[in-house]
């Protein structure tokens, strides 16, 4: 039977002053990233596989936290102040590489959901074997991961560690050291419960080994009974999960159908609105064209009017000129007649009249030109023959 194994620890720059061999931030990171001389417990150390973030992300976050963190009394972070939350999640003996890889996404999803952007790095180790009953390596790979969390400078470390927060709260309430430790254990148990709900149950693990199982070894029959019950429980959970997923898919499908219908209504309305607006634009354009046509017709009528006025004026000028010419002719005739009657013989008079008629005819046939706008209006009129 497989049981979940997950834990978290808090580390500082100098480690605890009460511990003669304190574990520090640098030591923990050195072991995780297999720095030289920092993994003596591993026979053949290998480079860890980086699953999320990087060592540079961790170091930059720690540097920022040390530089800018201030507590409630505006004090900077002490060297023994907690700055790094490091955790380990292990897979049980007998785990294959495929099962380990399948479970990674579940674990990392939980860590990202719980710690958010403060989760700086996740690495996996595949270079450590399990120990046998004598404490010696027996060759079976111990698949596990390490994860690292660093708070933002404006956040307190205790808000990321349930046990430390519970102990701090108990101290504020005036509880003694024993009661504070009990609060710490209780809250860390809550952390294990949360991990089991979010991760362990999906990996087919038991949350913890019951006391009665710790005290005696299970027989094969007992082990099979418990294993069968566990498999049945997992099957029921999977069935429930599949049913829930189907219901969710059905609900989403209904939502999509409603959304599509609503979208069709909106699109149809938009098309109708666009059609109405287009018709308004066309009507307005036609009105503008009619106005332009009316202006053009008015201009043409005005031009024709001015043309007629100019023509009438020209006719009047020609008529006046003709009348004036006739008057002049008659006057000349009268003068000539008087002179002739007085001094010239009759045969000479007839000759003179003939000459005068010819000249008057030339004078009254002269072309009169009147310029109106851009058009020359020409009008010629001959005087009626003078008898």
Image (cartoon, rainbow, N blue to C red):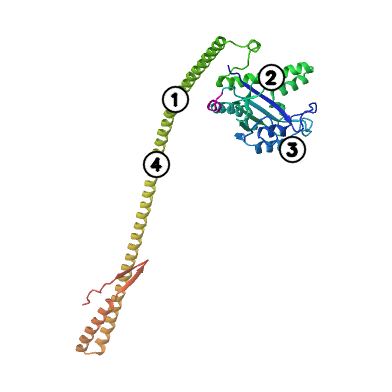
Which comes sooner in the sequence, label 4 or label 1? 1
The answer to whether residue 97 is magenta is yes
Q: Residues within 10 Å of mark 3 (few under 14, many from 20)?
A: few
Q: Is 32 above or below relative to 207?
A: below
Residue 375: image location, x then y, percent: 34, 67
Q: Which residue is the site of mark 1?
A: 253
Secondary structure at badge 3 equals helix
**Residue identified by numbered label 3:** 67
Residue 105 placement: quadrant: top right
Instruction: Provide the residue span drawn in magenta.
Output: 95-100
User: Where does residue 241 sit, x and y in percent of width and height?
Assistant: 50, 19
Residue denoted by label 2: 187
> To which quarter of the image does residue 194 belong?
top right
Distance of label 3 from label 4 (alpha carbons): 65 Å
Measure how far apart labels 2 and 3 are at the Cα level. Answer: 30 Å
Residue 51 seen in the current view: no
Q: CA distance from mark 4 to mark 2?
A: 69 Å
- Give the prevailing secondary structure in the magenta stretch: helix
Q: Residues within 10 Å of mark 1 (few under 14, many from 20)?
A: few
Distance in Å between CA atoms under marks 3 and 1 = 52 Å
């Amino acid at each position: 039977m497989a049981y979940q194994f997950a834990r978290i620890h808090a580390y500082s720059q100098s480690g605890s002053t009460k511990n003669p061999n304190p574990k520090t931030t640098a030591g923990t990171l050195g072991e995780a990233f297999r720095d030289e001389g920092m993994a003596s417990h591993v026979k053949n150390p290998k480079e860890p596989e980086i699953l999320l973030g990087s060592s540079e992300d961790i170091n930059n976050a720690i540097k920022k936290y040390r530089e800018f963190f201030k507590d409630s009394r505006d004090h900077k972070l002490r060297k023994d102040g907690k700055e790094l939350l490091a955790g380990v999640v292990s897979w049980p003996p007998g785990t294959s590489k495929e099962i380990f890889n399948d479970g990674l996404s579940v674990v990392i999803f939980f860590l990202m959901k719980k710690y958010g952007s403060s989760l700086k790095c996740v690495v996996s180790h595949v270079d450590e074997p399990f120990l046998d009953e004598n404490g010696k390596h027996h060759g079976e790979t111990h698949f596990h991961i390490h994860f690292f969390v660093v708070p933002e400078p404006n956040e307190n470390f205790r808000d990321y560690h349930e046990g430390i927060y519970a102990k701090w709260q108990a101290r504020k309430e005036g509880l003694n050291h024993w009661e504070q430790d009990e609060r710490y254990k209780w809250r860390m148990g809550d952390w294990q419960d949360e991990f089991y709900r979010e991760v362990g149950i999906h990996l087919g693990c038991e949350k913890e080994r019951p006391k009665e199982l710790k005290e005696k070894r299970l027989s094969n029959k007992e082990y099979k009974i418990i294993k069968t019950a566990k498999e049945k429980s997992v099957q029921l959970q999977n069935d429930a999960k599949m049913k829930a997923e189907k219901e969710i898919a059905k609900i989403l499908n209904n939502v999509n159908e409603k959304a599509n219908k609503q979208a069709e209504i909106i699109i149809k309305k938009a098309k109708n609105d666009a059609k109405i607006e287009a018709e308004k634009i066309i009507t307005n354009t036609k009105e503008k064209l009619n106005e332009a046509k009316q202006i053009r017709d008015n201009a043409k009528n005005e031009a024709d009017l001015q043309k007629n006025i100019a023509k009438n004026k020209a006719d009047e000028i020609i008529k006046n000129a003709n009348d004036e010419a006739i008057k002049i002719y008659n006057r000349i005739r009268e003068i000539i007649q008087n002179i002739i009657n007085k001094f010239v013989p009759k045969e000479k008079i007839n000759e003179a009249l003939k000459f005068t008629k010819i000249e008057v005819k030339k004078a009254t046939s002269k072309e009169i030109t009147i310029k109106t706008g851009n058009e020359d209006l020409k009008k010629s009129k001959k005087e009626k023959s003078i008898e």
